[in-house]
Image (cartoon, helix red, strand yellow):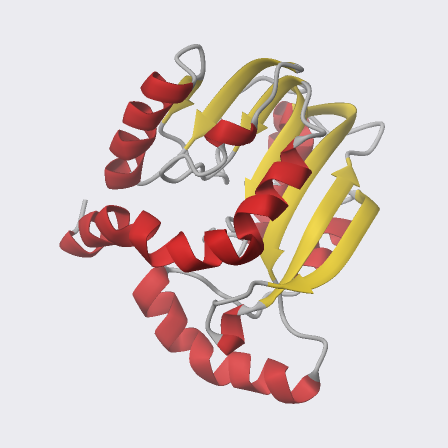
Amino acid sequence: MTLRSRFFAMTYDRQMTKVEQAGLGARREGLLADAAGKVLEIGAGTGSNLRFYGPAVASLTLTEPEIPMLRRLQRKAGEQMPAAMVLRAPAEDLPFEDATFDVAVSTLVLCGVDDQPRALRELRRVLRPGGQLLFIEHVRSTDPELARFQDRMNGINRFVVGCDCNRPTLDSLQEAGFTIAQVEHTTLPKAPKFARPAIVGSATAPASVPSRDAQLATGDRP
C-alpha cells in the first residue's frame, strides 16, 4: 500500500463527482438495469455502482485489488448492500470456479488492469457459457488526431490515475472470444479531453470456455 494509492482512494469520489453528475451516473444506472442472477463486479473501487443493482440480482460479489479502495468499498457495501461479498483480488487472477457467474460488470476497469488479455480470459472463465459482460470503458478514439493526443498524454495519465486511456478495448473483447451484443461509442462529459472517448454495452461469453486447468495444461496462463 503506497501513499499514492491511499491518496487516490481518498480523493476518487470527489474527483469523479462532476463526471458522475454530467452523465456517468445515468450510464451506470442504465447499464446495471440488465444485471440479474449471480453477478460479479471486478475493480469495484469505492462502490460507485452499488446503488444501481436491483432486486433481480440474486447474489453480488465485488472484487478490488487495492487495499485503500477495498476498505472504502467494504464500508459502502456494508451500508448499501450488506449481503454482498467483498474480496481482494486482481481481475487477472479471480478466485472463483469456472462458470460461476451469470453476469460480470466492468466499469472503467479494463483501462487500468496490468494485463488486459489475461483479465478478459479470467472473465470468460468465471462466466457461465452465454453469460453476459456489462461494460463502460475508456477506449482509444476513432479520431486519429485525438488518438495521437491520447498517446501523448497516456504516460502522465497512467502515472496520475493508473489508466491507459488509449487501449482498443472493444477489439480486445472480441479477440478474447466475447461476442459484442450491443455497444455505444460515447464520451464522458467533464472528463479531460483525452479520457472522454468511451464505450458502453454488453458482450456474451462463448458457449465453451477453456477451464483454468486446461489453460495451465497448455501453457496458456489464465
Give percent across and percent down for residue 5: 23, 51
Give percent across and percent down for residue 211: 68, 25
Residue found farthest to the left? 3
Foreground of the two, 181 or 151: 181
Does residue 25 lie above or below 112 as drawn? above
Give percent across and percent down for residue 49: 50, 35
* Label tally: 0
- Which image quarter holds the N terminus? top left
Residue found farthest to the bottom? 145
Give percent across and percent down for residue 6: 19, 48
Residue 217 in view (yes/no): no
Residue at 40% across, 32% down? 89
Q: Quadrant of residue 66?
A: top left
Foreground of the two, 24 or 65: 24
Residue 43 in view (yes/no): yes
Residue at 50% across, 40% down? 92
- Which image quarter holds the C terminus? top right
Foreground of the two, 190 or 222: 190
Residue at 46% across, 73% down? 192
Residue at 78% across, 44% down? 177
Does residue 169 lie above or below 40 as drawn? below
Q: Would residue 67 be found to the left or right of residue 150 on screen?
A: left
Q: Would residue 109 be found to the left or right of residue 215 on screen?
A: left
Foreground of the two, 58 or 215: 58
